[in-house]
Image (cartoon, helix red, strand yellow):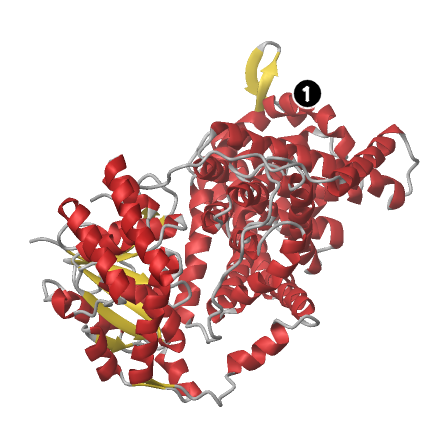
Amino acid sequence: MKETIIALVGNQNCGKTTLFNDLTGANQYVGNWPGVTVEKKEGHLKGSDNVKIADLPGIYSLSPYSPEEIISRNYALGEDVDSILNLVDASNIERNLYLTTQVMEMGKPVAIALNMMDIVKSRGDKIDVKRLSQLLGCEIIETCGIDGKGVKEAAQAAVKAVGGDVSKQAVIKFAAPVEKAIQGIDELLGAKLPKQTKRWYLVKLFERDKKVLEGLALSSEENKKLNAIVNACEDKLGDDAESIISNERYNFIEAIIKDAVVKNDSVNTISDKIDKLVTSRIFALPIFLGVMFLVYYIAMDSIGADMTDWVNDVLFGEIIQPGVQEWMEGAGCEEWLTSLVVDGIIAGVGAPLGFAPQMAVLFFMLSFLEDCGYMSRIAFIMDKIFRFFGLSGKSFIPLIVSSGCGVPGIMATRTIENERDRRMTIMTTTFIPCGAKLPVIALFSGVIMGGEGWMATAMYFIGIASVILACLILKKCAMFAGDPAPFVMELPPYHMPTLKNLFMHTWERVSDFLKKAGTIIFVCCAAMWFLSSFGFEEGALAMVEDNANSFIGVIGGAIAPIFAPLGFDTWQAVAASITGFVAKEGIVSTIAIVSGLEEPEEVEEAKELFDATRALFPSVSAAFSFLVFNLMDSPCFAAIAAINREMNSKKWTFRAIAFQNIYAYLLCTVIYQFGRVFVEGEAFNAMTGVAAVIVVFAIYLVLRPASEPMELKAKSTAVVKN
């Protein structure tokens, strides 16, 4: 029996993710669309293994302005899709119906889920759903993502629509000159177009849609005749083709709204009242700073810290490690095997896992800010600031995402149309501390500041400051010069997130970390245990008493002088940094292993790990320099792979990695050398002079006139198939 496929289509921030989660539950699988890095979510409808729902990327139109729009329309146009469930934000119905009018033209069966009806009712607005359904010619179901009302019925309506009569669905009849032009295009090219979706193709040809034209591969004569038809209509109506169609769509929507919707304009909504404060010129930034401090304080210094202490001190320190060691010794295991399992794997993996509760608390709070609508306001607020530095607010969205994980943060840059801004954002977005870096921050907050919660907040804002400085420098280069991309984003109304969605989002992020702990960090710990336990003594491979004589001791010692200007030239610190190039979480594991915390009683308290880490650095400035370097240098292998996919160029990937490491090295040279003099009270020396030169050079790079923009080669991202 053929599987029924329903495409879930809607604007961004319309509640599509919540509805998708409610419909599919745990029956989801996430990947990427073939050939691109746009996330692909699919899942089977709960209670029906024969119905699959594809959650398409959130879009505002079906015009080819971004990869999401291209992917969504290509998928919806495909023969595999049996019906479309169009999710419409009822609280912003005019804007959402713009996409609906385009979806109707595709010739696919459509059902509409009219979402966020609770907000509509709270405003005192009224929507005549029955009349709206008659005007649009399809079934419309009222839904509410918060309590799940109508969600199941909406899915059933989409299934019921499969195989239905699509001729009843509303298709806009444009003004006479436009319809005449479309008829002319039909006579010219209609034989080349798919029958079911012909109307949609005809409208896109009138708009001179580049991807449709590429897919049809018209002859020069056909192109000439097509342009003549469209030009005649443009001359008659005095506007360009895209604007003509856009105006016609809004005229159609206006007529529908007038007939089926009654708005209560006298009501000042809660969202409006909150936005007057949180987006105001005076209070917006202080509120943002206060919110982020509170988030990190709760996660790193209070609730999250208490949970982490229990995992470190009790679960691993008193239960797991002593228990496993006692069992293995009782079973007569070899000493080296017991050491590998207890001192290498459990001690190594346990060190970053101990910070998982802090990560869970942080992700839970960030998910709350995202789901309630505040994160969209932050992007709006930061657009004003970022535009001053040559970036748009769209560049801040990947930075927000990167606070969870750098990989989706890098992928989020695909929403930036300007190729220069996109590349620059990819190169700098991993400066924001991600979840993998939180264990490192937590460890060094204990080492440097005795575990103060504001340390994590400070790292977050140091990351933002580093992004701004890097962008100021890069924007003056010919490869990145030019005006920033315009920022257009819909601000969703505030609403209370559901606990189910918050826990689901938190688990998705924490589970990624746990998977790394069970795979990458596991392998790193085993490898680091071997490298720190074995070496050559008297010409033969053997376990060494002194870790400095081990393989990693020799390798780290050879590389260590390179990091002397940064303040950490011990082989242990260098070995930890090397591990960080594979996975940032591995830094904590490596420090635990190479510091000789081998006996269970030695790691009974997190304080022992703090003390062992502190002993690796000559001063607080050196420890701080180490922390910043490992936050700013090139990210983990997974993120580097994402950079390579998004850049679609080995040359640009190399440039990005080289820039990140050089930037981190020079920045931390300045941090340590100035900290050594002005904080530690040591004498000014030649390296301090070098640091001063770096600062002067950086100021020059920021203040120098911008170069002329370099012309970029156009790239084709996708082609619409006929």
The quadrant where residue 586 appears: top right
- In the image, residue 314 lies at what x, y percent? 55, 56
**In the rendered picture of this protein, how many numbered marks are placed on residues?**
1
Residue at horizontal 88%, vertical 28%?
686
**Residue assigned mark 1:** 558
681 vs 699, left or right, is right
Give percent across and percent down for residue 219.
Answer: 24, 36
Front residue of 121 and 445:
121
What residue do we see at 24% from left, 67% from top?
172
Q: Quadrant of the C terminus?
A: top left
Left or right for 113, reference 281: left
Q: Is residue 333 above or below residue 70?
A: above
Q: Position of residue 348 (x, y in %)?
A: 54, 40
The quarter of the picture where residue 94 lies is: bottom left
In the rendered image of this protein, does residue 33 appear above or below residue 254? above
Q: Secondary structure at mark 1?
A: helix
Q: Nearer the viewer, residue 611 or 699?
A: 699
- Crowding near pointer 1: few (<14 within 10 Å), some, many (20+)? some
213 or 619: nearer the viewer? 213
Quarter location, residue 587: top right
Q: In the rendered view, tell whether residue 169 sits above or below residue 142.
A: above
Q: Pick out the residue farthest to the left.
A: 1
Tell me which amino acid carries mark 1: Ala
User: Can residue 677 be seen in this snapshot?
Assistant: yes
Q: Residue 678: horizontal and vertical position, in percent?
A: 88, 44
Note whether residue 23 is visible: no
**In this rendering, is residue 678 above or below 13?**
above
